[in-house]
Image (cartoon, coloured by chain):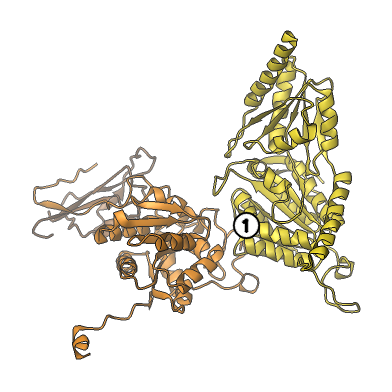
Amino acid sequence: MKGTVTVDEALCKGCGLCTSACPKGLLTLSIRFSARGYHPVELIDPDGACTGCELCSVICPEAAFTVYRARAAA
Amino acid sequence: MTVPTLTRDMMPVVSYPDALASTPTHYCPGCTHGIAHRLVAEVIDELGIAQDTIGVASVGCSVFAYNYFDVDFAQAPHGRAPAMATGLKRTSPGKIVFTYQGDGDLASIGSAEILHAAARGENITVVFINNAIYGMTGGQMAPTTLPGQRTTSSPLGRDVASQGYPLRMSELLAQVDGSAFIARRSLHDVVNIRRAKKSIRKAFEVQQQGLGFAMVELLSSCPTNWGLSAQDALDFIRDELVPAYPLGEFKVPPPPPDAGEREAR
Amino acid sequence: MARKLLKGNVAFAEAAVRAGCEAYFGYPITPQTEALEHMARRMPELGRSFVQAESEVAAINMVYGAATAGVRVMTSSSSPGVSLMMEGLSYIAGSRVPVVLVDVMRGGPGLGNIAPAQSDYNQMVKGGAHGDMKMIVLAPATVQELIDLTVEAFDLAERYRCITVVLADGSLGQMMEPAELPPMRPPRPLEARPAWALTGARGRDPQTITSIYLDPEEEEAYNMELQATYRDIERREVRYVEERLEGARIAVVAFGTAGRLSLTAIEAARAEGIAVGLLRPVSLFPFPEERLRRLAEDVDALLVVEMNAGQMVSDVQRVTRERVPVHFFGRTGGVVPMPEEVLDAIRGVHAGLAREEAVA
């Protein structure tokens, strides 16, 4: 896989902006509740489609994303 | 929950900015204050100026901005941040001073202070969050509210006959000789957010170069008081605010003379 | 008119409308912004003036302008915003034009917070701004009183050509209570404006409204006119409420919300056998000095309860001149004391009196 992201659930407010920003639709709001009462976003990427394009981290108002890219692509 | 697999060749390319405090913010979900804060923090990190930066928080939703940045901060009365920044900057050689203000703070009660900070060419950087409404106090009309826009103090829609026209602060301040860099950008999508960051960086660099007053106006959203979802609010910026507040750089410092010219002289 | 559940801020705004208020100029500030929002809708509906000014400084000067035209005009704000209005209020006092101001106090100083407080007593009661000025200051404790005093404020301001302040706090502004609004009193027609008003010098000599008197002796003479007005106000406009003072050995002196919650404590104290009552000043300027002096003769101790660090207590001490011990209980910074805390303070005063008697 070329890239992946992690979301800090202590920061995510479930605003959903990243779910529209991700060009591959890999982000969805979970049905769980975070400790702060929001539905945190999660990456669902069974096929390893994430390229680490960073668009989610650019739109995120909480700076909740850490974006990773494989060394060759980085 | 799917836990991403971090293989050994994965490098973090984006992580939490150092200049941003770890305190979760009180802003509404989807509020673009968070994006603006992140961009300012990233620029401070990239320029390596965190330990020499002093911010001035204003009165509005961002009144607690000082809790969200890991830099020194002062809190100014409503509208007075440019005056406080003047006092700070002139007595703090080598420090970088910036204000972070909303549309009520900057364009309403603070209209004299911002005008005169620009006129004096104060070497400060102003981050101006324009979301065309008063957020903190519950959605009243702002000087940048659009004609026809409904707010709690323009309940039938802003009536220009009795409530006047919106102010385009970037255009106004670009007329002032003391302004060195004035730009308006938008935070409504990734492309524009990236351009916004470039302008914010320029606005700090202009201060570092001692060229005069620098301001970046950022078209922003207020989902709660606009009564829109976070994504619809971004679309509102794109569809309604951008046409009313054109994007671009309204004043830029003149380019430095190039080597050839210098030698010729 | 029937009683309705009304929010304080909306109540005073609508009360002003019905008192014939012709213009409202203000600025958003918590905890009174609902008044501005109500006026934003009502005033245009009735063909009257409303502007959300660019700041409180601009707002008070818009008020000043309308006042010089002899129009019934008001503004409302909260502590930091009222501070901004001080220059304008001095000009207004120095020009003897009538103005009504509702101040919904909040925690301070500085930006403070949006919680209720009474820490602007000194600011408002001592005159507030520069110069030898005073403003009539009325302190409601219920939404009904807030309505009634707002209506009266317009009459008082016009009768004495002065500023009348309705001094409320955030809890009164935000709470909802059943209350009755007065019937609508229409604004005056142009012909009925006061003789001194600037309405255009048609059929009369031009007149000026100013607060500048360059010659000091002239300025002093003008000030003596103002002083005469204030003496007049002191003689005729004292207002207070007494509760449970029959046979009281301790009197609580408290205004506004502090008075209201003190009454709860007093009822509980009475049930415990403590002979305590309440003097609740409703006019803070003019201060009920004569009543307080008489009260000091009748009781063994006074307990001043305020939502500040001790402001009215100084006036109580000054007026009663050490006739009785004056105790103080206060919470400040936006903290609203619970009746239990006031009850504890009453018990403390009572215990102190009992100790003195035991020793005597």
Q: Residue at x 45, y 72 (%)?
A: B118
On the image, which quarter does residue B192 sit in? bottom left
Q: Note the chain letter of the orange one.
A: B
Q: Quadrant of the N terminus of chain B?
A: top left
* Residue C241 in picture, x, y percent from top left: 81, 34
> Three-letter amino acid code at disc 1?
Leu
Image side of residue C16 versus residue A28, left or right: right
Q: Residue at x 69, y 17 (%)?
A: C352
Name the colour assigned to chain A in the rendering: brown
Answer above or below: position of B77 versus B142.
Answer: above
* Nearer to the camera, B119 or B38: B119
Dot 1 falls on a residue whose secondary structure is helix
Residue annotated with mark 1: C84
**Can residue C92 be seen from the camera position used here?**
yes
Image side of residue C233 versus residue B13, left or right: right
Q: Note the chain letter of the yellow one.
A: C
